Each structure stands twice: as structure tokens, then as C-alpha cells.
Image (tube, rainbow, N blue to C red):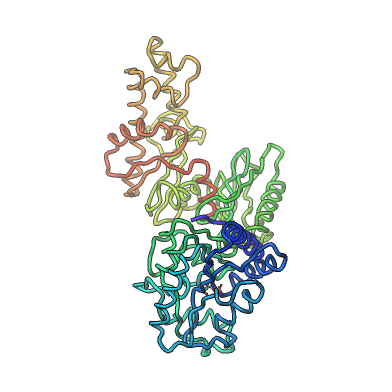
């Protein structure tokens, strides 16, 4: 399905009119399928103007309307006959005999529906069909149900649709309870489909259409079976956007996240001169700018450091007990949530990355140190504010000193920095080894893997010892949390199976061990999901 997201109703109508104009230019005898309702009115208005200006000619066009209330007489100002005439037909030069709308006055609905199907068939089929979508996901008057009808038929309207359509009637009890409508197969036989959706009330329906499996309970999801559907919607109908901010030592990455996907982003540099005030101002401006375009529900911030009572203290940033979230929330008038950046990355992986589907998981980031995030029951476990500092659990008493003030911390043995140190030590002891050759220019986390590929036993030994440490920490975490999924991220995760397969063998407990997939986007997506 093609998706065109517009700023507002006018832009949506412009886009739809352009597509229809192109269709009519290419095929003047187009067979048009038409919807009623508020969604296509702007499009019809534009097409009417194009016809008046001589840009478009409808004289060879044939039209079929999706549906009509039943029973209703065509002169009733709520009938779709009346609607089409007022909003479209009387503004274009379509021949009245070429327009087809189901007869809401018929005394034999079954025959009327069969006749209508025949007419469509005889016309050669609809070239392009304009659809709206009900807030309950209906298409035409194919209402959510356990079964749907294939061809044109009579149907009863759901309470939700009666309520939604009552806005056009004086009273809700005047809305007809039945309708005649094209069936799902009639609709799917159109060569092209253009679905229009605008406004907040369509958000849920569009979300379901885009993300749910095909189900008769949301008839619009059937459109996924069609090869040429274009959805044109405005931000209100599409956007359930949240802003995610991933603050780092050098920059803050601000992203607009919709359905766990980043749809717009901006990087704000952070320099040694940056102050709490300048960072707050820059973040506010970025969020405010995005807010003008995207309907923003909330803002989430991932930041390094410790978060206590929603206040941040970070050694590599000018934040000391700083209530960034509170300040931004007051300025932006939206909810702002804050969490540790590693925890946000873990949440990002859980909602949209390799951890999707695992409610309990731990993300282990192997880098200069070891970072981590613990997700329990779909939520970040932050304890008193600093849980998840897995790199600083002690795995060696009286072990190597750590900048945190402790000794024998896991990251001193199982981070990439540790692997590089172990590689250098092995090179010193084995200067004639393949490993020494691979590391003669520069030793990195990859050196050991490169040497193993060339068959180096010294490198194999280095990796074996390193993996013993890595596995010991992971086994400890599994013992404590009894979770199913462990994700590995950071530069070393690029080694893929060369890392995962031997590591798995050393982990004594059952678990799914996977490489994280979102890379640098995990923090933004996770922050937005807070
Ligand atoms: C109208 C139709 C309906 C509407 C839908 C959205 O012919 O078949 O499915 O398209 O109910 O209505 P609006 O556009 O008024 O929100």
C-alpha cells in the first residue's frame, strides 16, 4: 500500500484531486467508483473547479457509488443521491445516465444489488475507486463482523456508524438502520483504490489498517489483498507521534516517532560550552518546531547518568539534579518522561527491534564499557533510579580496578575495551602469531575475529577466555531474572554468529541470544515509547 501523509484536509484533497486528474487525462472514459461522506468533499470540490476551468472533462466518465442508505428516497437531502448531486455531479459535465447509485427506494433490494453488480461488470469494471474509512474500520457499509459479503448486498449499520453519521441528521433516530453497499470483492475488483482519511477520529482505524493482520473485524484490512491501494491521510488520522530524544555526550538526537518508526529527526550538538539552559532551549525549539507539523502526544528523553525523582545527574553533561523533563513539560504543555539512555535503548529494542514479542529481556551493550537495560513485563526496571548498571557487577574479587571505584567489574573483563586489552597482551606474548600480524597496524574489537578467520590458535584462545567472562555475566543475569531473551548490541555485535554461537555454548542456562537490530535508533524509539 502506498501511503501519502498530508499536513491537513486541504493538502489531502489536493493530492487526491491530482491523482484523479492524471487518471482522467490518461483515460477520459474512466469508470470512477465514488464514496460519499466528509472525506472526499474537498476532492470533489477541486475536481469540480478543474472541470469549470476546462482542465478536466467528465463527458465520457462513468461513475458508480459505493452505497446508499435503505430505505431512503433519492430526493431526501440525506440520501447519497442528493449528496452526490450537490457535492459533485452538478459541478461537472458527467452525463446523468452515466452515473449509478444504488436505489434506496427499491422494493426488491436483492434484485437491485444484482442489477448494480451487472452494471459495474458491463462497464468493464471500476478503474479507480475513492474510499473513505469508518472510524470502526468499515469500508463502504461493510461493517466489522465475523463474515463479510463479497458482492453488493443489503446490510444493517452498526451502532457506531449510526452514531458517526448522525452528525448529518437532525436526530440520531432519523439515521436509516440499513444500507445497500458494494461488497468487499466488488471493492477489491477496482483496478486502483484511493482511500482518504482525515481527522483524529480515524486514527485508530488507520493504525489498524496499517499494522494489523487482515481481519473481517476491521474490513479495511482487506485492502491489503489489493495490489494498488494509495492511502492519503492527514497527520491527525495518521499521527500518533511521540518525540523521542536520545541525549549523548556530543549531541542530542531528537526524533519524531510514529508507530515505533522514526519519521523525522534532528541532531542538536552538545559542546563543552553547552549549559543546562542552552540544552533546554535547543531541545524546546526542536520539539516545538516538530510540534507544528506533527500532532505530538508526548516527549520521552533518554539521558546518560543517574535519574532520581525525575532529576538527572550526569558526569559528561552539565546536569546536576536537573529537572529537564519538568521544565520541558511546562514549556511544551505535553507529558515529558525521562529515563536512562541505556534503558531507553533496551525499551526501543523491546517495542520495535530484536526483542519485539519478549516482555522480559536484557539488552547488553558491549562498548568502551558494558551498558545495559532490563525490561521486565514490558517496562524498564530502574529500581531506585540506577538499576541496569550491569557492567559494574563484580565478577572477580580483588580484580581489576574500575573507574566507578569498584574492583573486578564485569566491564573490565567483557567490554570491547577489555577484549582489546586481552588481544594486546596476547600479541605481546606471541609476537609471531597471526593475531600479531592482524593487529600490527591497530588493535580493535575485530582483530581477534579477523585472526580466527585466518586460523590463528592464539586468537581462538583470546576469544575463548573473553567469552568465558562474557558468559559468566550473562549466566548470572539469567539466574537472577530468569528471562528468555538477551540482546547484544554495540560494535562487537557486528561479529554476529562468530560471537553468538560460541557464546551460546558457554551460557549454562536456556535463553534466546540475539543481536540487537535498531542500532543508533534504539534510544530515540525507546525514549518515545516511555
Ligand atoms: C460513504 C461510505 C462510508 C464513508 C465512511 C467515512 O459512501 O461508504 O464508508 O466513507 O463512513 O465517512 P466520512 O468521510 O464522513 O468520515
Q: Is residue 433 above or below residue 186?
A: above
> Residue 284: where, in percent of width, then height?
68, 53
Residue at horizontal 71 percent and vertical 48 percent from the top: 277
Q: Is residue 296 visible?
A: no
Q: Residue at x 67, y 74 (%)?
A: 91
Q: Position of residue 327 (x, y in %)?
A: 66, 57
Residue 51 visible in the current orientation:
yes
Examine the rendered structure and indicate whether residue 296 appears above or below residue 82: above
State the residue at coordinates (41%, 46%): 354
Q: Quarter-wise, where is residue 10 in the image?
A: bottom right
On the image, the x and y values in percent for residue 450 come to: 40, 22
Of 184 and 161, the residue lying toward us: 184
Q: Residue furthest top?
A: 432
Seen from the viewer's position, the closer of residues 259 and 139 is: 139
Is 516 placed left or right of 300 in the picture? left
**Marker count (numbered):** 0
Residue 468 placement (x, y as % from top left) = 33, 31
Of 191 and 8, the residue lying toward us: 191
Q: At 45% across and 46% down in the image, what residue appears?
A: 373
Amino acid at each position: 500500500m502506498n501511503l501519502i501523509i498530508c499536513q491537513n484536509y486541504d493538502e489531502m484533497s489536493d493530492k487526491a484531486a491530482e491523482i484523479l486528474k492524471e487518471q482522467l487525462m490518461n483515460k477520459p472514459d474512466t469508470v470512477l467508483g465514488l464514496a460519499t461522506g466528509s472525506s472526499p468533499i474537498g476532492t470533489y470540490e477541486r475536481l469540480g473547479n478543474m472541470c469549470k476551468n476546462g482542465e478536466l472533462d467528465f463527458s465520457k466518465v462513468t461513475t458508480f457509488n459505493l452505497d446508499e442508505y435503505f430505505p431512503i428516497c433519492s430526493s431526501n437531502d440525506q440520501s447519497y443521491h442528493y449528496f452526490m448531486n450537490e457535492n459533485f455531479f452538478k459541478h461537472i459535465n458527467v452525463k446523468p445516465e452515466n452515473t449509478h447509485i444504488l436505489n434506496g427506494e427499491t422494493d426488491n433490494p436483492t434484485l437491485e444489488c444484482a442489477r448494480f453488480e451487472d452494471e459495474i461488470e458491463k462497464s468493464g469494471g471500476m478503474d479507480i475507486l475513492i474510499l473513505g474509512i469508518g472510524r470502526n474500520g468499515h469500508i463502504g457499509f461493510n461493517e466489522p463482523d465475523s463474515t463479510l459479503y463479497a458482492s453488493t448486498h443489503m446490510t444493517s449499520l452498526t451502532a457506531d456508524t449510526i452514531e458517526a453519521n448522525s452528525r448529518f441528521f437532525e436526530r440520531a433516530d432519523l439515521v436509516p438502520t440499513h444500507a445497500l453497499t458494494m461488497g468487499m470483492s466488488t471493492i477489491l475488483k477496482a483496478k486502483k483504490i484511493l482511500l482518504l482519511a482525515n481527522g483524529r477520529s480515524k486514527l485508530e482505524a488507520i493504525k489498524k489498517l496499517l499494522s494489523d493482520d487482515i481481519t473481517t473485524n476491521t474490513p479495511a484490512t482487506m485492502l491489503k489483498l489489493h495490489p494498488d491501494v494509495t492511502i492519503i491521510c492527514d497527520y491527525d488520522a495518521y499521527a500518533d507521534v511521540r518525540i523521542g530524544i536520545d541525549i549523548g555526550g556530543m549531541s542530542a538526537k531528537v526524533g519524531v516517532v510514529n508507530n515505533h518508526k522514526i519519521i523525522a529527526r534532528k541532531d542538536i550538538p552538545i559542546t563543552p560550552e553547552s549549559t543546562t539552559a542552552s540544552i533546554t532551549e535547543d531541545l524546546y525549539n526542536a520539539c516545538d518546531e516538530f510540534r507544528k507539523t506533527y500532532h505530538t502526544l508526548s516527549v520521552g528523553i533518554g539521558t546518560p547518568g543517574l535519574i532520581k525523582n525525575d532529576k538527572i545527574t550526569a558526569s559528561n553533561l552539565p546536569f546536576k539534579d536537573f529537572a529537564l523533563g519538568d521544565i520541558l513539560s511546562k514549556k511544551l504543555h505535553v507529558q515529558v518522561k525521562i529515563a536512562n539512555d541505556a534503558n531507553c535503548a533496551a525499551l526501543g529494542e523491546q517495542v520495535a527491534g530484536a526483542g519485539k514479542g519478549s516482555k522480559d529481556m536484557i539488552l547488553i551493550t558491549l562498548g568502551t564499557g558494558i551498558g545495559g537495560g532490563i525490561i521486565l513485563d514490558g517496562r524498564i526496571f530502574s529500581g531506585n533510579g540506577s538499576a541496569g548498571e550491569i557492567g559494574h557487577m563484580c565478577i572477580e574479587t580483588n580484580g581489576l580496578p574500575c573507574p566507578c571505584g569498584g574492583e573486578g567489574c564485569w566491564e573490565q573483563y567483557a567490554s570491547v575495551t577489555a577484549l582489546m586489552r586481552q588481544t594486546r597482551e596476547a600479541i605481546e606474548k606471541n609476537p609471531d602469531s597471526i593475531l600479531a600480524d592482524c593487529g600490527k597496524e591497530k588493535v580493535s574489537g575485530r582483530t581477534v575475529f579477523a585472526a580466527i578467520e585466518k586460523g590463528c590458535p592464539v586468537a581462538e584462545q583470546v576469544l575463548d577466555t573473553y567469552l568465558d567472562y562474557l558468559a559468566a555475566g550473562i549466566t548470572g543475569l539469567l539466574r537472577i531474572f530468569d528471562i528468555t531473551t538477551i540482546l547484544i548490541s554495540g560494535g562487537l555485535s557486528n561479529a554476529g554468529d562468530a560471537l553468538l554461537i560460541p557464546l551460546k555454548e558457554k551460557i549454562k542456562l536456556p535463553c534466546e541470544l540475539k543481536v540487537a537490530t535498531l542500532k543508533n535508533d534504539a534510544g530515540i524509539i525507546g525514549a518515545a515509547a516511555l
